[in-house]
Amino acid sequence: MRWYQRLFQRKLAEKQIDAELRFHLEQQVRDYTASGMTPEEARRRARLEFGGLDQVKEECRGYGRCVWNKGGERRG
């Protein structure tokens, strides 16, 4: 595989990881909002529980992929 193909695949994988992480974060915010939290508090709590997106992305790169359970938590 040529270097530019690897670079393109890496960028595509990065976008996919980012989209998936944001989906799970927003899903958690929706769940908290549905349980009665204000949108601001729901977003704050989800971010605290989820952790920094950059840190989570780094974990995913280390594992090759991230696996999520039904509660939206990482399983490694």
Image: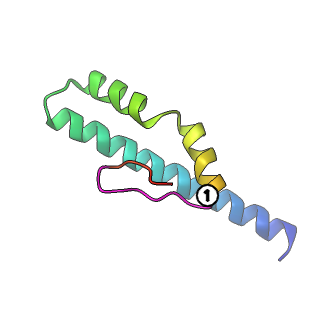
Label 1 crowd bin: few (<14), some (14–19), many (20+), radius 10 Å: few
Q: Residue furthest bottom?
A: 1
- Give, as a single range, the part of the protein colored magenta: 64-71
Q: Would you place residue 63 above or below residue 40 in this image?
A: below
Q: Would you place residue 68 above or below residue 54 in this image?
A: below
Residue at point 58% right, 52% down? 60
Residue at point 21% right, 23% down? 38
Residue at point 70% right, 60% down? 10
Residue 76: x percent and y percent?
Answer: 51, 54
Residue 42: x percent and y percent?
Answer: 28, 28
Residue at point 78% right, 67% down? 6
Name the image quarter holding residue 43.
Answer: top left
Q: Residue furthest right?
A: 3
Name the image quarter holding residue 36.
Answer: top left
Q: Is 69 in the magenta? A: yes
Q: Main secondary structure of the magenta part?
A: loop
Specify the quadrant that holds the N terminus.
Answer: bottom right
- What is the secondary structure assignment of the residue under circle 1? helix
Q: Is 4 in the magenta? A: no
Q: How is the image coloured?
A: rainbow
Residue 11: x percent and y percent?
Answer: 68, 57
So how many labels did they put on this image?
1
Observer-nearest of 49 and 18: 49
**Residue at which label 1 appears:** 63
Mark 1 belongs to which amino acid?
Tyr
